Image (cartoon, rainbow, N blue to C red):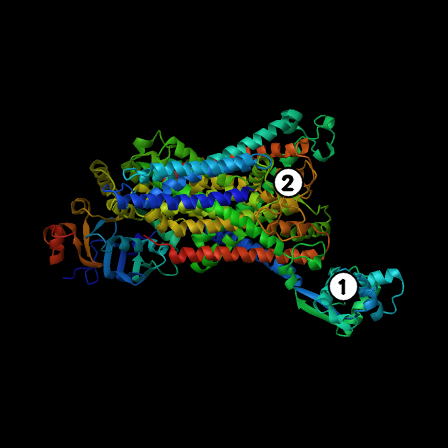
């Protein structure tokens, strides 16, 4: 049995594959961060990426929406496809790509604008609303789907930075949802939050997966076990093992996976 | 005479050091008690005791108006000698020379940091004092609100004030016009340059542009003034004549444009600091939503940096208002209340120079008017700087 | 896999194209802005250099001069008569001999105007250095006036350049005979100011700047270093030290002309110091430079790690000894760099020195800090106003001299910083 998604059975009919990565090698200057990564992200599923710090999980998801383009020394080799189209190909427009693949960062980064304007930002940029009413609708429904509307309904004009940490992160999720993405990438979204806020966001993620494909990098194995359907274990830039979450946590095939799960390192 | 006395004092001080140190050494070798402080400190103590009163008196003598009275010069020598003798008597093994000397040195250092306050005090007092004498001759309201400025014609004392010859409004307006022109050159170019260099430029372009901007900042303003008066002014005039416009050879446009070029590096480097202070996480958040780099800059980075940029612009305005040589050489001398950049206007700094340079008795209303203008200039630039720094500080606190 | 793909509408595609066009425009604006700034710099420097070139060369004419004893020593007094003799007559005689067609007084005056007013003195120097010249006829190199020099610079076939037809033909014929020589204008670097452009030089202003900057350095460096040391090492954090800091920052932003007003009101009028002296100029500039030195010094002192101080205190040094013997030497490169940069700025200052009277026409080279002097930027300012066309090149050349000094000082500061400043 192969540890990754490169072999037969990878395109079976039980699920749809949204994103694929094949033979992905990523370099920061001379240093190689990812080695021959083969990984699928399935449609409307939460895929958790776990592993000790510095093993390439963030690098991987930043490749998916080409955020690594921002880093001048980063070199990407291999193929990443979204719905079968090569993400680094010439026909793909990176601005469109990033509207289809949204990202939520580790530390909440709301713009120094009002709550309303934060959520409306993406919609304005992409021209998704022609009238103010349409924009209102987009903002309201995004805040609703992010589970934030009730708390900020009468504070829409307040600066986004005046919210609590957990609220700010949900604001960032609402902001990402507002552009109507197909995929949401999350890079340790709860690591800066307290347990209560974390729980709310985990519940949110569980709801979101009905409409969005989600890939989440997390340090917490408990979190991965709670919210994901598929889990990929990264170690030193390699995908050691990937599979159904239940199987990974109860019966991992690779000894390294077992060591990590049982807390021997990381 | 003063130089001679100073030389004698120096020799005396050197001798004091030598004598003090020798005395301490003798005591150390002679008696059973160990010295509290090393001999060199005893030497320094004696030196200070001799030099301080001596040079203080000498300085007093030199600063008094008129030639220094010989009595004071002799007194300085006498005080120095007395200090030396008294100090030598104090030297004993148990004498705590080092702490005394160190305290004295610290006091001297502290006094030098007071110079900043003294300088500000000196500026304020001298400006206020002389301006007050001016306002005794010309009422404040005439000065601040009068529309006619022709100080050269107000020669007779009884003419002062009555014909409104010291109405400074045209002069203020001239400063404003040229500052406006300079800002409309410096702010777009400086800000866009800063944005381009920090967000778009390749490292090689940045490596050439940053030093070039530093060079632009380091060129003395008299060179800019020369360039404005002899190259830019005539060029603008020729161009204007070809277009059928009437352009003065000392147009506000020429002086203002060159002043704007001088201020570009100022705006650019301040904006650069401010733009770099915006956290990268905001840029990434915007890019991750599918915004282009220019949209990110225009809709996220610049609005976030806006208070800082406003502060930078205020500082640049302060610099433009206080600038002298470019306008002295390239702007006009006659007061002219206009908004037309093709005409010649005069500014506050030009008037200060023309009123004070040349033969005049110091007490006339003309020269005192220069101090009144100087006071206005000082107050305006001070206010601009204080406001700008406060704005920038509050902006920085947001992101630290 | 393609069942999950969402279609892209034509409207979206159009919008995308517009957005990318806006992106390209924005980038172009930025590139245009920096290009304009660089272009302004290049135009400024190139125009100064081009205008300055003529000032570095001067034209001299080789004229046969008869050192006749009747003119030089009509009363037969011998060597004693030579210093005070009428060398002007000798010049006129030489011109008449060369141009016999010039008959009237007016025409002779015209020809005399071709030579510099220095010509008689040049002849005197020749005679005094070699008395045997008396009685001989010799070819002597004489300096031409600025008008003649301008005409010859222009290639000689331009319009008259303000010269009369006689003067033009005289110059042309001399040039045809190969009697005109172009020499490097050492005079420009060795002489003080003069009303005659061909005699004017920057040496007086350079020496004046030197004396002024010496005073500035002697005042601002010790005071600034001491103040920086005090504020960083000894001063307790109090309202008073905050006040000092606020004052320093404000002083750094005060327009330079206000310092000139202070100098005028206080140093000249209250203390009675001599006008236009480097001493007063240096004091005014020192006040201006002090904030720069203090701010740079404080940054350098703050950069010294606490471990250095702790180690020194640990072996029993007093706080003053720690500051002077351990911290200051390590911070010295930074303090010096700040001082050099402050000096460079002071060298280029004009306005405050105009206020304290350095605007007079000074011919003598100042020999001390209390002699009336001028400084290089003020010299540039005065020459820029001069009506004679030849001063245009001189002003530009003086600007190049000033820029050369500034470049050297800034280069020294950069080298100092790179060589000695330690990164902790």
Residue topped by disc 1: C82
Q: Could you tell me residue C390's position as x and y percent? A: 71, 58
Q: Relative to C382, is C241 above or below?
A: above
Helix, strand or loop at mark 2? helix
Determine whether, in the image, residue A42 is placed left or right of residue B73.
Answer: left
Given the image, what chain letter belongs to the residue carrying mark 1? C
Q: Could you tell me residue B281's position as x and y percent? A: 34, 46
Q: Relative to B131, is C331 above or below?
A: below
Determine whether, in the image, residue A95 is placed left or right of residue A240.
Answer: right
Residue ranking furthest to the right: C104
Q: Could you tell me residue B371's position as x and y percent? A: 61, 33
Helix, strand or loop at mark 1? loop
Residue A132 appears in view: no
Which residue: 37% across, 34% down?
Answer: A159
Residue topped by disc 2: B353
The residues bearing labels 1 and 2 have C-alpha atoms spaced at a distance of 48 Å
Determine whether, in the image, residue A34 is placed left or right of residue C40.
Answer: left
Q: Could you tell me residue C218's position as x and y percent? A: 48, 47
């Amino acid at each position: 049995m192969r540890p990754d998604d490169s072999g037969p059975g990878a395109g079976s009919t039980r699920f749809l594959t949204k994103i694929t990565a094949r033979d992905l090698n990523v370099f920061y200057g001379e240093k190689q961060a990812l080695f021959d990564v083969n990984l699928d992200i399935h449609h409307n599923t939460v895929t958790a990426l776990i592993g000790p710090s510095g093993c390439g999980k963030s690098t991987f998801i930043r490749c998916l929406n080409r955020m690594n383009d921002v880093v001048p020394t980063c070199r990407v080799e291999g193929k990443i496809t979204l719905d079968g189209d090569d993400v680094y190909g010439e026909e793909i427009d990176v601005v469109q790509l990033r509207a289809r693949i949204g990202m939520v960062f580790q530390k909440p980064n709301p713009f120094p604008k009002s709550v309303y304007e934060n959520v409306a930002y993406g919609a304005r940029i992409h021209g998704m609303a022609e009238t103010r009413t349409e924009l209102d609708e987009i903002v309201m429904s995004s805040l609703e789907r992010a589970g934030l509307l009730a708390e900020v309904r009468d504070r829409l004009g307040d600066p986004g930075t005046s919210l609590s940490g957990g609220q700010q992160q949900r604001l960032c999720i609402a902001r990402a949802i507002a552009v109507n993405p197909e995929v949401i990438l999350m890079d340790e979204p709860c690591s800066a939050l307290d347990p209560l806020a974390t729980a709310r966001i985990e519940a949110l993620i569980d709801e979101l997966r009905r409409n969005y494909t989600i890939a989440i990098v997390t340090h917490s194995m408990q979190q991965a076990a709670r919210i994901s359907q598929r889990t990929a274990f990264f170690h030193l830039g390699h995908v050691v093992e990937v599979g159904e979450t239940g199987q990974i946590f109860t019966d991992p095939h690779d000894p390294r996976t077992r060591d990590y799960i049982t807390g021997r390192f990381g | 005479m003063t130089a001679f006395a100073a030389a004698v004092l120096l020799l005396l001080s050197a001798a004091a050091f030598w004598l003090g140190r020798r005395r301490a050494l003798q005591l150390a070798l002679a008696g059973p008690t160990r010295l509290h402080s090393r001999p060199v400190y005893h030497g320094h103590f004696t030196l200070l005791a001799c030099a301080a009163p001596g040079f203080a008196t000498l300085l007093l003598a030199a600063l008094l108006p008129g030639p220094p009275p010989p009595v004071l010069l002799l007194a300085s020598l006498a005080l120095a000698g007395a200090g030396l003798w008294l100090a030598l008597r104090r030297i004993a093994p148990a004498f705590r020379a080092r702490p005394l000397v160190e305290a004295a040195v610290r006091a001297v250092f502290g006094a030098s940091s007071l110079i900043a306050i003294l300088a500000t005090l000196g500026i304020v007092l001298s400006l206020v004092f002389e301006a007050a004498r001016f306002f005794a001759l010309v009422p404040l309201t005439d000065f601040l609100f009068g529309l006619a400025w022709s100080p050269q014609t107000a020669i007779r004392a009884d003419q002062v004030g009555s014909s409104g010859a010291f109405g400074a409004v045209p002069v203020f307006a001239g400063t404003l016009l040229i500052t406006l022109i300079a800002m409309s050159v410096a702010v777009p170019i400086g800000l866009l340059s800063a944005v381009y260099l920090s967000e778009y430029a390749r490292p090689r372009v940045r490596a050439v542009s940053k030093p070039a901007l530093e060079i632009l900042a380091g060129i003395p303003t008299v060179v800019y003034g020369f360039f404005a008066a002899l190259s830019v002014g005539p060029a603008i005039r020729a161009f204007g004549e070809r277009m059928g416009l009437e352009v003065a050879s000392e147009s506000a446009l020429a002086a203002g444009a060159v002043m704007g070029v001088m201020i570009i590096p100022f705006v650019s480097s301040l904006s650069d600091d401010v733009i770099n202070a915006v956290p990268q996480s905001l840029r990434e958040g915007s890019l991750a939503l599918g915004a282009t780099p220019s949209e990110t800059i225009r809709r996220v980075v610049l609005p976030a940096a806006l208070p800082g940029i406003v502060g930078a612009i205020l500082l640049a305005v302060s610099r433009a208002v206080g600038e002298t040589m470019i306008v002295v050489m390239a702007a006009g001398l006659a007061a002219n209340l206009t908004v037309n950049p093709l005409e010649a206007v005069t500014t506050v700094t030009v008037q200060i120079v023309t009123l004070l340079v040349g033969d005049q008795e110091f007490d006339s209303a003309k020269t005192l008017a220069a101090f009144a203008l100087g006071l206005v200039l000082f107050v305006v630039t001070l206010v601009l700087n204080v406001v700008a720094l406060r704005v920038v500080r509050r902006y920085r606190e947001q992101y630290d | 896999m393609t069942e999950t793909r969402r279609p892209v509408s034509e409207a979206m595609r159009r919008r995308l194209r517009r957005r990318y066009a806006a992106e390209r425009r924005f980038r172009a604006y930025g590139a245009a802005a920096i290009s304009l700034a660089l272009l302004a710099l290049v135009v400024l420097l190139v125009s100064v250099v081009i205008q300055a070139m003529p000032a570095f060369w001067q034209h001299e004419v080789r004229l046969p001069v008869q050192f006749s004893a009747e003119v030089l020593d009509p009363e037969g007094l011998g060597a004693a008569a030579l210093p005070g003799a009428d060398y002007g007559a000798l010049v006129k005689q030489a011109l008449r001999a060369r141009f016999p067609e010039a008959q009237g007084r007016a025409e002779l005056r015209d020809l005399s105007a071709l030579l510099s007013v220095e010509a008689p003195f040049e002849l005197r120097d020749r005679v005094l250095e070699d008395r045997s010249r008396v009685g001989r006829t010799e070819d002597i190199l004489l300096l031409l006036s600025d008008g003649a020099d301008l005409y010859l610079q222009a290639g000689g076939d331009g319009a008259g350049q303000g010269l009369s037809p006689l003067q033009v033909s005289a110059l042309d014929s001399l040039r045809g005979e190969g009697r005109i020589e172009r020499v490097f204008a050492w005079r420009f670097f060795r002489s003080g100011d003069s009303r005659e452009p061909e005699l004017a030089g920057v040496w007086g202003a350079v020496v004046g700047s030197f004396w002024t900057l010496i005073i500035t350095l002697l005042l601002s460096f010790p005071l600034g270093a001491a103040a920086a040391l005090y504020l960083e090492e000894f001063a307790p954090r109090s309202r008073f030290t905050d006040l000092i800091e606020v004052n320093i920052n404000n002083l750094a932003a005060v327009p330079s002309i206000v310092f000139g007003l202070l100098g005028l009101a206080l140093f000249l009028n209250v203390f009675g110091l001599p006008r236009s002296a480097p001493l007063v100029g240096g004091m005014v500039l020192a006040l201006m430079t002090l904030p720069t030195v203090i701010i740079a010094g404080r940054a350098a002192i703050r950069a010294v790690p606490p471990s250095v101080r702790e180690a020194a205190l640990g072996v029993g040094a007093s706080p003053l000894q720690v500051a002077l013997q351990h911290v200051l030497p390590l911070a010295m490169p930074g303090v010096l760099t700040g001082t050099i940069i402050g000096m460079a700025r002071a060298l280029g200052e004009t306005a405050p020195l105009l206020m304290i009277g350095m605007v007079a026409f000074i011919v003598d080279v100042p020999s001390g800090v209390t002699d009336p002097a001028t400084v290089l930027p003020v010299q540039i300012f005065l020459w820029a106003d001069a009506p004679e066309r030849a001063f245009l090149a001189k002003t530009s050349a003086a600007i190049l001299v000033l820029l050369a000094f500034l470049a050297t000082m800034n280069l020294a500061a950069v080298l100092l910083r790179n060589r000695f400043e330690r990164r902790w």
